[in-house]
Image (cartoon, rainbow, N blue to C red):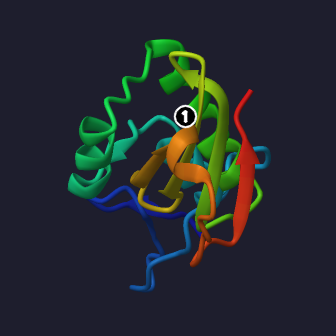
C-alpha cells in the first residue's frame, strides 16, 4: 500500500491511520541530543554563589570558567546530579570548591581555600577535580 504525507510530515496509511515515523540507523537518540544541548548551555551562578564570590573577592578567569564547564560536562556524562567541583589554583592561585547542580548547570555555592577548612559538603552525589 502506498502512503502519503500529512502536513506534520508523518506518513498516513490510506486506510486512515498514522504510521510510526521511520528512525534511520545511525541517528542520535533523544537522550544523546538532549545531553549535547545541555553541554552547549552556559553555566549559571545562583544569587547565593554570586554573593559568596563577591564576599570572598573570588574572580574566575575565562580559563577557570572553561575548566569548570568541562568538569560539569564530565560529571553529566557520568550521570551526576549535584557535584562538588574542586579547582586547584583556580582563583589567583588559590584552591576553589564549588557545589554545582549538574542537571540545572547552576553553581550553587563557592568557597576559596581559606573557607574550605572544616567544611562538610552535603547533598552531592559526586566530586570532580577540574584540570
Residue at 57% x, 78% y is 123
Where's residue 47, x and y in %? 21, 54
Hey, which quadrant is residue 27 in on the image? top right
- Residue 127 location (% of width, % of height): 73, 56
User: What kind of element bears circle 1?
Assistant: helix
Q: How many numbered tags mark residues here?
A: 1
Residue 118 against residue 27 in the figure, above or below: below
Above or below residue 131? Residue 62 is above
Position in image of residue 25 (x %, y %): 78, 49
Closest to the observer: 92 or 101?
Answer: 92
Question: At 59% from the left edge and 68% from the top edge, which residue is drawn?
Answer: 81
Can you identify the residue that label 1 sits on? 69
Q: Would you say residue 112 is visible in this rendering?
A: yes
Judge by depth and name the residue closer to the eye, 4 or 62. 62
Using the image as rendered, state which of residue 23 and residue 124 is in the foreground.
124
Q: Is residue 38 left or right of residue 131?
A: left
Disc 1 crowd, CA 10 A, few/some/many (<14, 14-19, 20+): many
Amino acid at each position: 500500500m502506498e502512503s502519503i504525507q500529512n502536513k506534520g510530515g508523518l506518513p498516513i496509511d490510506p486506510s486512515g491511520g498514522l504510521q510510526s515515523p521511520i528512525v534511520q540507523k545511525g541517528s542520535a537518540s533523544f537522550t544523546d541530543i538532549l545531553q549535547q544541548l545541555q553541554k552547549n548551555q552556559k553555566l549559571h551562578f545562583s544569587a547565593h554563589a554570586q554573593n559568596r564570590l563577591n564576599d570572598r573577592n573570588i574572580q574566575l578567569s575565562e580559563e577557570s570558567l572553561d575548566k569548570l564547564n568541562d568538569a560539569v560536562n564530565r560529571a553529566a556524562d557520568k550521570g551526576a546530579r549535584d557535584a562538588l567541583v574542586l579547582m586547584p589554583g583556580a582563583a589567583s592561585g588559590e584552591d576553589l570548591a564549588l557545589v554545582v547542580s549538574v542537571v540545572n548547570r547552576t553553581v550553587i555555592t563557592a568557597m576559596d581555600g581559606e573557607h574550605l577548612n572544616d567544611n562538610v559538603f552535603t547533598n552531592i552525589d559526586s566530586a570532580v577535580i577540574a584540570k
